Image (cartoon, helix red, strand yellow):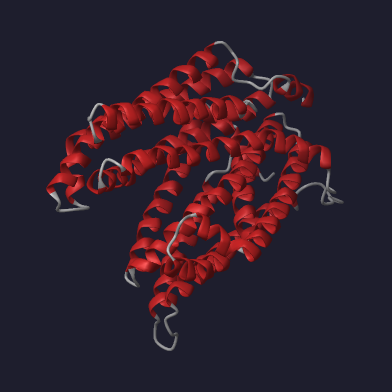
Amino acid sequence: MTQKVNAEKERTGLPWILFLAIPAVIENFFQTIIGFVDTYFVSQIGITEVSAVGVTNALLQVYFAIFMALGVAANIYVAKYTGAKNAEKAQQSSWQSIYLAIIAGIVFGVVTLFFAEPMLKLMGAESAVIDAGKTYFKIVAIPSIILSLTFVVASILRGTGDTKTPMKISIYVNLLNIVLDYVLIFGFWIIPGFGLVGAATATVIARLIGVIWLLSIFLKREGTREAGWKRPAINFGEMKKLLTVGAPASGERLVMRIGQVLYFGIIVSLGTATFAAHQIAGSIEVFSYMIGYGFATAATTIVGQLIGAGRIEESQKYALQCTAIAVGFMSIVGLILFFSAEWLAGLFTTDTKVIADITVALRIDAFIQPILAIVLVLTGVYQGGGNTKTPMYITAIGIWLLRTVFVYVLGLAMGFGIAGVWIAIGIDNLFRAIWLSISFIRGNWIKEGFEEKAEAAN
């Protein structure tokens, strides 16, 4: 890799953690803000169009889960071999990840082409929403190869220790998406407005530019290798290794999505106002996740590189430091949520009942924040150690059993309403935080054989 990346790998201590985490936090922040703006533009077209985008995005979350899992696998192995200073293996993992991304992108594109409408019908959408949604869905998801390559190539760069490049590209691409959204949705000068089709087209154009940019940087760095460099051929053994790690990571995200469907039905039965309050509180809480995911990204990269270098004890130290720093930052977020809950609720609605429910939810959530930090960052630590199965199992038990059961018992059966729902969320996160912590202390966070293979790479 280039001298720039090598210099980043030489960072140590707190500067190394912050150097990797802060760009990831900023990237997440911009993506969240852009999502709000995107939704606002579409909402100006009509309610049907907003619903169409909402239903489509729910389906796309399944696509994202698969593509993000491939990215996690790429990050894990590229970080490990980068730490081991084994450029050949890092290159091999990078290219096999890209091949898998291409295959996955083509498969999901074909599925969308032939089954877009049936999948929307499975979501229970009305006919008007399906008619609008299938066009949007096809435009955005048939070129799924753009999405899959974006996730994987960005993760490869992060695995080398470069979180700034994906951040910069993401910011520019999302800002471009805003401009294109406005122009293609509403029209500008000689360009007519295309409504929902324009929104979908803007998204695809922006993402295409982003992935071309990412690939150009990746290929430029690959080209700096020794003379006579050749692109590695497809290696099914390497692909299988990546899928073995990536599948549980994908499973964890799918488990979370399915779990949400299970307990959302219970919350809906509490009444429209309560469900609306829950949704708004969740939208506000999303901003705290940016911090947790940022430090989780740093933890995965640092831990992976240190394991690759055979510095296992040091990787444990950094894992704890990443977790502690994230707990500190998210505790501050918790304080902000607690004391500004009512004001934040008022930004979204004037309904006094909904405001009261949002306030209750956010004040309970304030106490969950440091616990959530442990869950998110330790999950990243486990991924850095090649252990993606344990977080998946813990998530399945936590959200399918504990969260769903306690949402019913506390929220519905005992009549605590929105308070019961968010206490249940806290119980789930506390359970996962304790299990992940105990397993980490016992040394069960590294996948069996992952450590030895890393040392052998040296």
- Which residue reaches farthest right? 228
Indicate left or right for 31 with 11 as reference.
Answer: left
Which part of the image, by quadrant, shows the N terminus?
top right
How far across and how far down the image is residue 342, in percent?
16, 42
- The x and y percentages for residue 151 are 59, 49
User: Which of 357/147 is in front?
Assistant: 357
Q: Is residue 160 visible?
A: no
- Looking at the image, the residue that sits furthest to the left is 352
Identified at 42% across, 81% down, the residue is: 193
Which quarter of the figure has residue 415? top left
- Left or right of 349, for residue 100: right
| 446 is higher (above) or lower (below) than 213 | above
Q: Position of residue 185 (x, y in %)?
A: 41, 75
Residue 262 as seen in the image, left or right of residue 303: left
Q: Nearer the viewer, residue 146 or 415?
A: 415
Judge whether residue 182 can be spotted in this image: yes
The residue drawn where x is 38% and y is 78% is: 186
* Towards the viewer: 135 or 332: 135
Q: Position of residue 443 (x, y in %)?
A: 59, 13
Establish if 98 lies above or below 370.
Answer: below
The residue furthest bottom is 190
In-front residue for pair 436/58: 58
* Residue displayed at 26% across by 48% down: 272
**Going 46% across and 38% down the picture, which residue do you hit?**
294
Image quadrant holding the C terminus, namely top right
How many numbered callouts?
0
